[in-house]
């Protein structure tokens, strides 16, 4: 009885040994093939695939194999869209047998992304009504089919990254350019697969404004489930240059006539989403503002008077702070944010403040008679919410004042 058992055990041991040797030979041949293939054909293969996917010209320096199982791409440049000094890729070996693209880690070193925003028709209110959403690059998809490839990156890291957002719909002909530099990103378990996976992320960067201004700081962290479309995250932006972004709200605030030289804002948003429905609770606060000095012979224009009045309203309503809290709702698969949301929140706060109502009434009474007689030509000069929520001096006075705004 003992001899057959020993023979069976020896046979099983030999089978395992042969299987292990076979796998080692297979991987040795595979790695040898990769090592020999990449210098000659790998570069052309990657370039042609990226051209097909993006519809752009693609240039690539070198592709190198780093034992035991890592690849390095140097000097990748997708025209007008993306470039990077180097990309380190560590594929998941198990993906070879599952038909899925699995990557243990991919590290982008000095990458630069260019996002361009365009609108087919530009209107006068385009800057104020613009929806800020992820910039989309128009790519022709004629003759292309979605192969439905499932993929997962267990970890994605970015070192010293840069994003240029060029918005041609706002401001002068060249548009508004917002740069985020010094980007560091750590993202885990990002995927395109039919399963629920929690993806954690940690993002940091800085925003250079005009020369001579302090840089802004942006940070975001949290988690996201792409399959269930759930999210829980915090976004912070400190040191926003309000003057630099003025083209977005120039239709309802003229910062030049208001003599605003510098305005610094801080923003924080707590983002919660479930089943694609996202609610963002936001806090925007003015941390510093500087007005251009006036010469003794210069008079204070109505826009500057109104701006000082509104600032005093906010300070009196919120213990000296100039801030606004608001919540907006959007979709996770199509996030949108408009400056009109902020405008509405500001108007609501003014309209709902009893203190601001009394103060604005007194200040408007002190305005020059020429203004009360019709120099203010539209409700946009002070905003409808300010008017409706501010006058409590008698119906006749209110009617007369509103009539002057209709001229």
Image (spheres, helix red, strand yellow):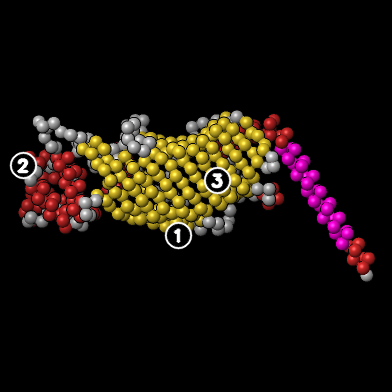
Crowd tier of the residue under label 2, counting other residues whose Cα lies within 10 Å: few below 14, some 14–19, many 20 or above = few
Give me the disc on residue 369: 2
Name the image quarter holding the C terminus: top left
> Left or right of 357: which side holds 11?
right
* Disc on the earlier residue, 3 or 2: 3
| Rendering coords of residue 330 (x, y %) | 39, 53
Mark 3–mark 1 distance (CA, rounded to whole Å): 24 Å
Crowd tier of the residue under label 1, counting other residues whose Cα lies within 10 Å: few below 14, some 14–19, many 20 or above = some
> Left or right of 151: which side holds 171?
left
Give me the disc on residue 156: 3
- Front in this rendered view, residue 387 or 76: 76
For the point 74% across and 41% down, the residue is 30
Instruction: Report whether residue 300 is seen.
Output: yes
Does residue 63 belong to the magenta stretch?
no
* Disc on the earlier residue, 3 or 1: 3
| Rendering coords of residue 69 (x, y %) | 68, 42
Mark 3–mark 2 distance (CA, rounded to whole Å): 64 Å
| Rendering coords of residue 377 (x, y %) | 15, 41
Residue contact between numbered discs 3 and 1, judged by CB atoms under 8 Å:
no
Residue located farthest toward the bottom when viewing the structure as drawn: 1
Stretch in magenta: 9-34
Placement of 50 over or under 341, stated as above or below: above
Classify residue 370 by image quadrant: top left
> Left or right of 122: which side holds 53?
right
For the point 53% across and 56% down, the residue is 198
Does residue 33 belong to the magenta stretch?
yes
Classify residue 258 by image quadrant: top left
């Amino acid at each position: 009885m003992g001899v057959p058992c020993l023979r069976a055990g020896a046979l099983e041991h030999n089978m395992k040994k042969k299987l292990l040797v076979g796998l080692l030979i297979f991987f040795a041949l595979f790695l040898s093939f990769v090592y020999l293939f990449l210098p000659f054909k790998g570069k052309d293969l990657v370039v042609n695939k990226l051209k097909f996917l993006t519809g752009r010209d693609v240039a690539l320096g070198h592709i190198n194999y780093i034992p035991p199982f890592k690849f390095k791409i140097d000097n990748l440049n997708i025209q007008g869209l993306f470039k990077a000094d180097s990309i380190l890729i560590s594929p998941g070996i198990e993906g070879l047998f599952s038909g899925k693209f699995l990557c243990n880690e991919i590290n982008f070193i000095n990458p630069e992304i260019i996002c361009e925003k365009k609108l087919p028709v530009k209107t006068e209110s385009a800057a104020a009504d613009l929806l800020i959403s992820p910039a989309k690059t128009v790519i022709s998809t004629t003759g292309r089919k979605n192969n439905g490839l499932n993929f997962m990156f267990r970890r994605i890291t970015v070192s010293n990254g840069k994003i240029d957002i060029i918005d041609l719909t706002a401001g002068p002909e060249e548009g508004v350019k917002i740069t985020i530099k010094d980007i560091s990103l750590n993202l885990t378990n990002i995927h395109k697969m039919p399963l629920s996976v929690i993806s954690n992320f940690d993002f940091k960067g800085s925003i250079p404004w005009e020369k001579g201004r302090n840089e802004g700081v942006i940070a975001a962290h949290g988690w996201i489930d792409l399959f269930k479309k759930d999210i829980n995250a915090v976004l912070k932006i400190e040191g926003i240059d309000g003057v630099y972004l003025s083209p977005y709200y120039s239709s309802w605030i003229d910062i030049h006539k208001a003599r605003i030289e510098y305005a610094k804002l801080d923003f924080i948003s707590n983002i919660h989403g479930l089943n694609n429905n996202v609610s963002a609770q936001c806090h925007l606060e003015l941390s510093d503002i500087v007005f251009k000095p006036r010469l003794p012979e210069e008079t204070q224009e109505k826009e500057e008077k109104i701006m000082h009045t509104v600032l005093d309203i906010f300070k009196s309503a919120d213990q000296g702070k100039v801030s606004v809290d608001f919540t907006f709702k959007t979709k996770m698969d199509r996030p949108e944010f408009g400056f009109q949301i902020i405008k509405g929140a500001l108007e609501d706060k003014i309209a709902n403040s009893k203190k601001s109502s009394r103060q604005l009434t007194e200040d408007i009474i002190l305005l020059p008679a020429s203004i009360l007689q019709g120099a203010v030509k539209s409700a946009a000069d002070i905003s409808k919410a300010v008017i409706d929520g501010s006058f409590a001096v008698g119906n006749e006075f209110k009617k007369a004042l509103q009539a002057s705004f209709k001229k």
